[in-house]
Image (cartoon, helix red, strand yellow):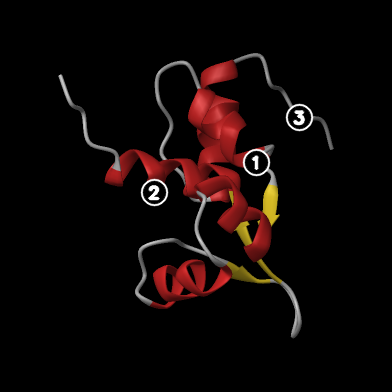
Amino acid sequence: MERNFDSGEKSAQTVARRVGTNQDPEGSEVITRIFDRALAIREAAEVLGVSYATIRRLMLAGRIPYQQVSERRTVIRESDVRDYLDSVTVDVT
């Protein structure tokens, strides 16, 4: 089966649909979501400078999306940690 990916825009939109993200005009959102690093809960806590328990509370409250990869492993996408940080950061200008 031959695939034609001449149109970068069309292939990026296809990938965006598969990944479940919206695509911006340059396609950077798609690339970010595909190659996004999965952080353990402790790693996410370290990045945000909060405790493990705080991350768990944020996850259970629905403020930080997460994926249960296996019975013992839960991961948070790095971009979701950045998005949360952006949502709670106050501009003091």
Label 2 to label 1, Cα distance in Å?
15 Å
Give the vertical position of 46 relative to 52 (above or below): above
Q: Amino acid at mark 3?
A: Arg
Secondary element under disc 3, as helix, strand or loop, is loop
- Name the residue that disc number 2 marks: 84
Of residue 2 and residue 44, the one placed in the foreground of this image is 44
Task: Tell me the number on the disc at residue 50.
Answer: none
- How dense is the environment of label 1, judged by Cα within 10 Å: few (below 14), some, or many (20 and up)? some
Which of disc 3 and disc 2 is earlier in sequence?
Answer: 3
Q: In the rendered structure, are the residues bearing label 2 and label 3 in contact, judged by CB atoms less than 8 Å apart? A: no
Left or right position of 37 against 79: right
Residue in the foreground of this view, choosing between 74 and 31: 74
**In what element is the residue under mark 2?**
helix
Q: Considering only order in the chain, which callout, 1 or 3, is on the residue closer to the N terminus?
A: 3
Q: Quadrant of residue 45?
A: bottom right
Q: Nearer the viewer, mark 3 or mark 1?
A: 1
Query: Contact, CB < 8 Å: mark 2 with mark 1?
Result: no
Residue linked to disc 1:
36
Is residue 57 shown above or below 14? below
User: Mark 1 is on which residue type?
Assistant: Asp
Quadrant for the N terminus in the image: top right
Q: Is residue 83 left or right of residue 12?
A: left
Depicted 24 relative to depicted 60: above or below: above
Between residue 85 and residue 34, name the one nearer to us. Answer: 85
Q: Amino acid at mark 2?
A: Tyr
Question: Where does label 3 land, which residue?
Answer: 3
**Who's the residue at 49% across and 50% down the image?**
20
The spot of residue 93 in percent (x, y) is 15, 19
